[in-house]
Image (tube, grey):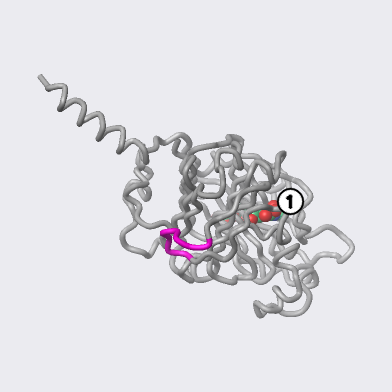
Amino acid sequence: MWSSFASFTVLALVSRSLAATYSLNQNYVGTDFLTAWTHEAIADPTNGRVNYVDQATATSLNLTYANGDTLIMRADDTTVLSASGPGRNSVRIRSNAEFTHHVAVFDIRHMPQGCATWPAVWETAETNWPNGGEVDILEGVNDETPDSITLHTGAGCTMPASGQTMLGALTSTDCNANDNGNAGCGVRAPSANSYGPTFNAQGGGFYAMERNSDFIKVWFWSHSDGGVPSDLSTGASSVDTDNWGTPTALFPNTDCDIDEEFSANNIIINLTLCGDWAGQAAVFNGAGCPGDCVDYVNNNPSSFSNAYWDIAAVRVYV
Ligand SMILES: *[C@@H]1O[C@H](CO)[C@@H](O)[C@H](O)[C@H]1NC(C)=O
Ligand SMILES: *[C@@H]1O[C@H](CO)[C@@H](O)[C@H](O)[C@H]1NC(C)=O
């Protein structure tokens, strides 16, 4: 029989270890993306040269292909577009479920690459933007590595200018979407293999995001890295983020009430082309991409043959 002292100690240890332990809530693989997510055939809010198609269109054109442990989503790579017509067919999907405190794990074999591409894996509450918050986990433009990890919020959320224990580098501290042209508060990942062609050349990787009242963290491991936490890589029934090491990005609640700034969010995976970021002449040409972004998209379908996602799984733990 345990003494009361012993049971007290055990309880204290248990509650401490539970703090960063989460249980599998959603395991999205293959055709789950057709039944538990929605293709959003909407006008691109970022003014890209894309035409987001619905699920029936995406599957019939094979822009979305779900089978076994594979989800492929791509931009059309065969059609020359009329300058006066709609943009290039592409795909944007959103999880039907929404999440508050959670861990999301993304096992990605390939991400869209090519001039004009602006892919993103992110979370937001679309009907309450920016007051429900936005977490951009994997995002960039025109093949320019590394990954940018960014929060966009309503008023009153900033990040400390220094002191975060993280692998990435702080690029901006004001998360308020109404300031600085919606630049948000951001972190640059440290390694080239976190984004685009280098990410793909190394077999893709794992992204993971943890959100609780105290912080938002993002981790990245290339599939070619050693030391990937086994609970994360195997899709275990529970994960303990305390064992995942220093995150790539850490956004603490020091000057940002995370539970106030972030409501329940959906997960979104999108691929736009050109638009407010990728399409700016200085950004497009600065990345070594030729001419005008919209002309490039209209006239060069074959340059989008690598503009596809290949996603092995998205797992959510709560
Ligand atoms: C795509 O994702 C980014 C997230 O970083 C978001 O800001 C942008 O509005 C999205 N664009 C489209 C067209 O869905
Ligand atoms: C659809 O795309 C998948 C993945 O790229 C490919 O394996 C399959 O052959 C394609 N199907 C057709 C009918 O083209």
Q: Residue at x 32, y 49 (%)?
A: 243
Q: Position of residue 254 (x, y in %)?
A: 51, 49
Q: Quadrant of residue 248?
A: bottom left
- Across and down, in percent, residue 16 comes to 30, 37
**Location of residue 307 by image quarter:** bottom right
* Residue at the disc numbered 1: 52
Q: Secondary structure at mark 1?
A: strand
- In which quadrant will I find the N terminus? top left
Q: Is residue 290 magenta?
A: no
Instruction: Specify the quarter for ligand 1.
Output: bottom right
Q: Is residue 191 above or below residue 40?
A: below
| Vertical arrangement, residue 126 with respect to residue 186, above or below | above
Name of the residue lying farthest toward the right: 84
* Left-right relation of 245 to 215: left
Which residue is pictured at 52% across the width and 44% down the height? 30
Q: Against 215, is 223 above or below?
A: below
Q: Which residues are magenta?
A: 161-168
Instruction: Tell me where residue 45 appears, x and y as whole percent.
Output: 76, 52
Magenta-colored stretch includes residue 165: yes
Look at the magenta stretch and give its main secondary structure.
loop
Tell which of 117 and 146 is nearer to you. 146
Give the residue at x 41% y 59%: 165
* Residue 262 vs residue 72, the one in the foreground: 262
Q: Residue furthest top?
A: 1
Q: Amino acid at mark 1?
A: Tyr
Q: Residue at x 61, y 42 (%)?
A: 261
Res 313 seen here = no
